[in-house]
Amino acid sequence: MAFSSSNLSQTAHGGLTGGQNGLWTYVTSDSTATTHGTGYFAGVGRGSRGAHGAGLSTGDFVLCLHGSTAATLSFVSASTANQASTSASTGWGAAYNASLTAIV
């Protein structure tokens, strides 16, 4: 299965780490290894102009619910520019990829 923006929602806004960080919930049947793999959360970082531009920021927390039997609490460890989504005609900053690191 692939990332689905309709399964990602912001649960709480700011203040969790003393800044602007938030808490997100993502529901999927994909495994932890899949959701934490490179490129899974492509284009969902804050500032993305793509279809999945949800606004995940470095330091945000994501509770991934993997079906009915498993959950992983993670944080966004990086939000990097997706250079493949950038072209001379659209300018810089078309998409930012978010990378998750598991806490629990």
Image (cartoon, helix red, strand yellow):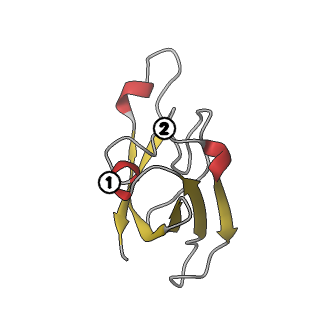
Give whichever of 4, 39 is nearer the camera: 4
For badge 1, the amino acid type reads: Ala
Tally of marks: 2
Up the image or down, 35 lies above or below 12; here it is above
Q: Residue at x 55, y 78 (%)?
A: 19
Residue furthest out toward the bottom: 18
Up the image or down, 18 lies above or below 10; here it is below
x and y, in percent, of residue 34 in the image:
36, 48
x and y, in percent, of residue 23 in the image:
59, 71
x and y, in percent, of residue 10 in the image:
66, 63
Q: Residue at x 51, y 32 (%)?
A: 94
- What's the CA distance linking mark 2 and mark 1? 13 Å
Q: SS for tag 1? A: helix
Q: Are marks 2 and 1 in contact (CB under 8 Å)?
A: no
Q: SS for tag 2? A: loop
Kindly indicate the quadrant of the structure image that contains residue 65. Answer: bottom right
Give whichever of 52, 90 is nearer the camera: 52
Q: Residue at x 59, y 71 (%)?
A: 22
Check disc 2: other Cα within 10 Å, few if <14, some if 14-19, many if 20+: few
Tag on residue 2? 2
Give whichever of 22, 91 is nearer the camera: 22
Identify residue for label 1: 33
Up the image or down, 21 lies above or below 83; here it is below
Check disc 1: other Cα within 10 Å, few if <14, some if 14-19, many if 20+: few
Point out the tag, 2 or 1, that comes first from the N-terminus.
Answer: 2
For badge 2, the amino acid type reads: Ala
Residue furthest out toward the top: 89
Q: Residue at x 59, y 39 (%)?
A: 52
x and y, in percent, of residue 37 in the image:
32, 48
